[in-house]
């Protein structure tokens, strides 16, 4: 079957075909480049956010060695350990209470630690304190809840 189209109709169909093909090509090119740009932009935002979080975590963690040193050098802990080794119950209890109060104060002031444990050389917890962010208070764990972290 042969279509007898006038010259005017042939030019019109060619013109429409060229327009549809060119708009399709431009649309396809725009879609692919914009989606690539969007993905690159999302990647950059993610990368920047990751760097920001990394710096924030590093900033918080830089205080950890100083805080550990502060606690290990605290006079009440040293006195507690000395009296505990000498098996002097009254003095041991007294210095444990002094250090425990200081530990509670430390956790409430710092607000970045969840739990601090004092563990002896045998791996037994001597003192354990936990900070509750919801109410901004620190609590000592009862002696019955202390764990043995040996081995």
Image (cartoon, helix red, strand yellow):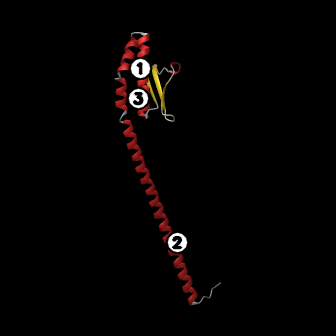
Would you call the spot at circle 1 few (<14 residues within 10 Å), some (14-19), or many (20 or more)?
some
The residue to which callout 3 is attached is 106
Q: CA distance from mark 2 to mark 3?
A: 67 Å
| Residue 117 position in % (x across, y down) | 44, 25
For the point 53% across and 19% down, which residue is it? 144
Quadrant containing the N terminus in the rendered view: bottom right
Residue where numbered disc 2 is placed: 24
Circle 2: element type: helix
Label 1: state its secondary structure.
Answer: helix
- Can you say whether 57 is above or below 131 in the image? below
Mark 2 is surrounded, within 10 Å at the Cα level, by few (under 14), some (14 to 19) or many (20 or more) other residues, namely few
Residue 98 numbered tag: 1
C-alpha gap between disc 1 and disc 3 = 12 Å
Q: Return the x and y of residue 149 as percentages of the image width and height.
A: 47, 22
Earlier-in-chain disc, 1 versus 3: 1
Does dot 3 land on a helix, a strand or a loop? helix
Say which of marks 2 and 1 sits in front: 1
């Amino acid at each position: 079957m042969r279509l007898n189209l006038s010259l005017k109709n042939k030019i019109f169909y060619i013109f429409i075909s060229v327009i549809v093909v060119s708009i399709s090509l431009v649309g396809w090119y725009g879609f692919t480049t914009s989606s690539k740009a969007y993905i690159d932009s999302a990647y950059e935002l993610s990368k920047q956010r990751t760097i920001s979080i990394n710096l924030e975590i590093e900033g918080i963690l830089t205080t950890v060695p100083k805080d550990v040193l502060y606690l290990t050098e605290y006079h009440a802990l040293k006195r507690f350990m000395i009296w505990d080794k000498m098996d002097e119950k009254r003095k041991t209890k007294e210095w444990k209470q002094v250090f425990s109060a200081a530990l509670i104060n430390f956790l409430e002031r710092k607000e970045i630690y969840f739990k601090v444990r004092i563990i002896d050389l045998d791996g037994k917890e001597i003192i354990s304190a936990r900070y509750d962010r919801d109410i901004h208070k620190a609590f000592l764990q009862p002696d019955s809840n202390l764990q043995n972290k040996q081995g």
